[in-house]
Amino acid sequence: MVAAASDLMVAFEVIGRLFEKETGSRVSFNFGSTGQLAQQIEQGAPIDLFAAANVAFVDELEKKGLILPDTKKLYAQGRIAIWTRSDSRIKPERIEDLTDPAIRRIAIANPDHAPYGIAAREALISAGVWEEIRDRLVFGENVRQTMQFAETGNVEAAIVALSLCVGSDGSWTLIPADLHKPLDQALAVIRGARNETQARAFADFLNGPKGRPIMRQYGFVLPGEGPAK
């Protein structure tokens, strides 16, 4: 059982199928906001591997003795983008364009517990538009739900993970990485995991020659490949 941040949904489902095919081990995913998944782990949920959208949450679990320290590894750096439906007349080219009055509602993941929501808030503040648009913001429980708000037309635009934009039926504009703190994503095997061997194997597979190209395909910057540009 892999508890994984929602930005990983598309990439991990591809990697999971490949892992099962090559190893014969079945992998199940529980996708959600990193903060909420960390709470589930603290409450004893039967999770083998935790793939967070921000290393800080893994660090906190380590302080509480809830992970196996030797398994903690960075596996990616995430990016954020503005996403709109392909049939929308609204096509923001810069984050400042979100101040357009035609954009009545903008979705971001809840910055109280979702790293991609935190990054979205940081970017909006850095761009100097947070105060102007904050009354138009709609919070999703996680970054996938945030994108669904835009997909269904309940909001005109959403700030979501680049990994969910790649290959989607929509339009997106990448937000400059220097507008927010790096989304350094880390994983770790949970202490007392029922399937520790398989969890370690999946972590190695993700960071290995089969998993890395898939992560790169979905817009992640990988360890050892330098910072996002």
Image (spheres, rainbow, N blue to C red):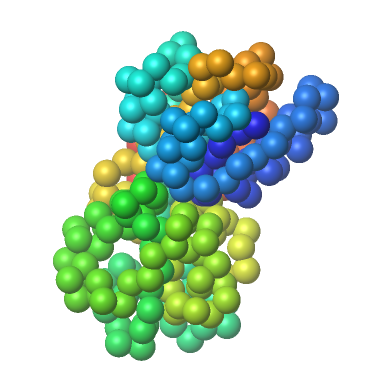
Q: Is residue 226 above or below residue 157?
A: above
Query: Which quadrant holds the N terminus?
Result: top right
- Image coordinates of residue 9 in percent, x first then y, are 60, 48
Point out residue 154 in the picture as x, y percentages from the top left corner.
50, 79
> Which residue sits furthest top?
70
Query: Is 210 on the left or on the right of 33, as rendered?
Result: right
Residue 185 in sight from this viewpoint: yes
Numbered marks: total = 0
As drawn, is 206 to the left or to the right of 125? right
Find residue 223 and report its image quarter: top left
Above or below, comparing residue 229 to residue 15 in the picture? below
Q: Is residue 124 left or right of residue 68?
A: left
| Residue 7 image offset from top left, x and y in percent | 51, 49
Horizontal arrangement in the rendering, residue 7 relative to residue 124 (left or right): right
- Percent position of residue 224, x then y: 43, 25
Up-down relation of residue 160 to residue 89 (above or below): above
At horizontal 50% and vertical 43% (from top left) the residue drawn is 5
The residue shown at (51%, 71%) is 149
The one nearer the camera, 168 or 140, is 140
| Residue at 44% over, 30% down | 42
Q: Quadrant of residue 122?
A: bottom left
Foreground: 60 or 46?
46
Tell me if I can see residue 211 in this picture. no
Which residue shows up at 33% across the image and 27% down it?
60
Quadrant that contains the C terminus: top left
